[in-house]
Image (spheres, rainbow, N blue to C red):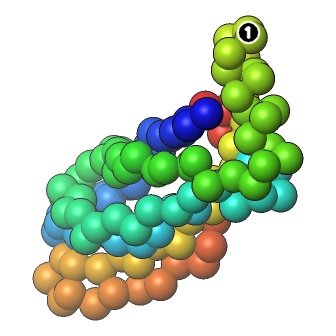
Amino acid sequence: MNYRIVLGAKVPVLNPNFFRSQISGNLSVSFYDAAAGWKDFGPEVVPPRSFPYDVRAKVDASNLPGKYTAVVIGCCLNFPRRLIFFLTAAFKVGGGCCGVGREWPEFRGGSGF
């Protein structure tokens, strides 16, 4: 049996400045303690004075070990349920008038998909 899980991620970015900026980075998805997939994105231009600007990415989260695959497929086939995946992200922000980039620390949060 083949399966594919593609998750949509939406990360709100606030840019209160009068200059545009750029954001790039990577998103990784895990299901409990198992890495499920990752995606590099950017650079994407964030318009000036955006409250917020949504950076969107689709992440292929099909790379689960066998012990979790049966759980995910069973939940999707039997009853419509909400599965919880964890999103870890690292961002690099730059641009504006100077083009200086800054590394932001890793962010980890849970979201139901």
Task: Pick whichever, 34 or 12, lies toward us.
Answer: 34
**Rendered position, 28 above or below 9:** below
Is 89 left, or right, of 70 in this rendering?
left
> Furthest-top residue in view?
79
Q: Secondary structure at mark 1?
A: loop
> Furthest-front residue in view?
1
Task: Pick whichever, 99 or 16, lies toward us.
Answer: 99
Task: Pick whichever, 47 or 36, lies toward us.
Answer: 36
Is 64 left, or right, of 14 in this rendering?
right
Please indicate, yes or no, whether residue 37 appears anywhere in the rendered image. Answer: yes
Q: Position of residue 50 (x, y in %)?
A: 27, 49
**Rendered position, 21 above or below 73:** below
* Residue 42 quadrant: bottom left
Q: Residue at x 73, y 32 (%)?
A: 72
Q: Residue at x 57, y 49 (%)?
A: 61
> Which residue position holds label 1?
79
Q: Residue at x 61, y 55 (%)?
A: 63
Q: Position of residue 47 (x, y in %)?
A: 18, 56
- For badge 1, the amino acid type reads Phe
Say how many tags the image has. Answer: 1
Q: Residue at x 81, y 33 (%)?
A: 71
Q: Position of residue 14 (x, y in %)?
A: 38, 54
